[in-house]
Amino acid sequence: MNESSTTKNVGVFKISATYIGTIVGAGFASGQEVFQFFTSYGMGGIWGILLATLLFFFYGYLILLLGLKLQAESHVKVVRFSNGKIIGTIIDIIITVFLFGALAAMIAGAGAIFQQQFNISPLFGTLIMGIITLLTVLTGITGVINAISYVVPVLLGSVLFITIYSLTKNPLTQEEIQVASEFGGVAPNWFISAINYASYNLVIAIAILAPLGAKAKPGKTIFWGALLGGLGLGVGVLAINFSILTSISESASVEVPMIAIANQISPIVQLVFAVVLFAEVYTTAVGNLYGFVSRISYIKQGFRKPIIIGATVAAFGVSQLGFSTMVEYLYPAVGYGGMLLLIGLGYSWIFKRKKFV
């Protein structure tokens, strides 16, 4: 793909913001992912968040570094370098399929926001999200990076505000933590859940981070970009986790817990957060569609626009399965498959480091 020269020498802020924005979509910012992967383990969930934050930093840095050294146009070079041709091909398929599935989940998430916030058919939300995502990706990676980096600071600020207000109004108690641990998470324990969470999110992120690394400024840019990105994700997850814990019973019964929590502050705050959340769902949908199209275009050069349109229409159809259903079943399944990616990347760091550091 021929991209604008303005994407060269991407700095620390845009790397960290793009990393965060690629991951904090419908599941993360809505609270649905955080509830299922962390909150449901009570105190163990907090340890899980710390572990996931560390994994986000290390693997984000490694993917960016490999993207730079290999001058990756998509995730393919990085995956095959770290995992070899056979296993790399399997992981490539997992990543490509999940990018499409996660795109559908983001579109479904937009529908859930419309239904819960405005009591409007989710069809309208999914349709709007599909159209604006399609139009953005048609502009190339410049539009993708800009769209993501503008929204991320607003989202994190909104999440922190809601968390601080919730904790001030309703201080966290041991009883609420105990109630949370009775719901049961998506994995046998918090340790596996944290690895699974980092794994499937990195499966999404590698599609953007690999080509982004190839365009990073030289020096420590990649290190600081990955560090700030990982810390931003960790702080965001921790804040959402505390917010959900302060009203655990209500949060467990809705598709978008953070909107329900924002409503406890005021209808205006709820509306503002719904708009911010919709914007964040949009940035992740954009990242997913761009990563998917980059991979398919790698095979079929010259068919980029038809692939973008076809993928968006197909994802719109799949999104009708519903948001929480996709988070509950699709994400953990891909997380287990994505652990192969983490093992391969870890192997390359230990045994192949001299080739790219």
Image (tube, rainbow, N blue to C red):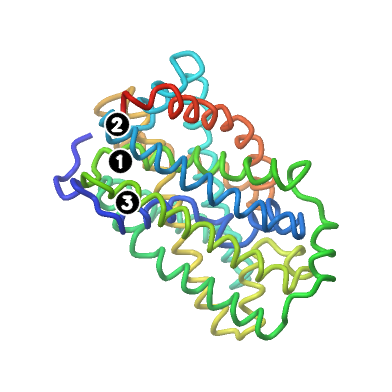
Between tags 3 and 1, which lies in front? Answer: 1
- The amino acid marked with disc number 1 is Gly
Mark-to-mark CA distance, 3 and 1: 15 Å
SS category of the residue bearing label 3: helix
Residue 172 is situated, as x and y percent measured from the top left of the image, at 74, 75
Q: Badge 2: how crowded within 10 Å, few (<14), some, or many (20+)?
A: many
Callout 1–callout 2 Cβ contact below 8 Å: yes
User: Is residue 67 among the parts visible in the rendering?
Assistant: yes
Q: Is residue 1 left or right of residue 206?
A: left
Identity of the amino acid at label 2?
Ala
Q: Which mark is residue 9?
A: none
What residue is pinned by disc 1? Answer: 213
Q: Secondary structure at mark 1?
A: helix
Find residue 264 and report its image quarter.
bottom right
Q: Residue at x 82, y 70 (%)?
A: 174
Q: Quadrant of the C terminus?
A: top left
Q: Mark 3 or mark 2, which is nearer to you?
A: 2
Q: Position of residue 255 (x, y in %)?
A: 68, 61
Q: Which residue is mark 3?
A: 144
The picture places residue 18, in percent across and down from the top left corner, at 37, 53
Observer-nearest of 208 and 263: 208
Is residue 254 shown above or below 133? below
Q: Does the CB distance between marks 3 and 1 fall below 8 Å? A: no
Q: Is residue 248 left or right of residue 108?
A: right
At numbered mark 2, what does the secondary structure look like: helix, strand or loop?
loop
Q: Residue at x 69, y 54 (%)?
A: 38
Categorize mark 1 by other alpha carbons within 10 Å: few (<14), some (14-19), many (20+): many
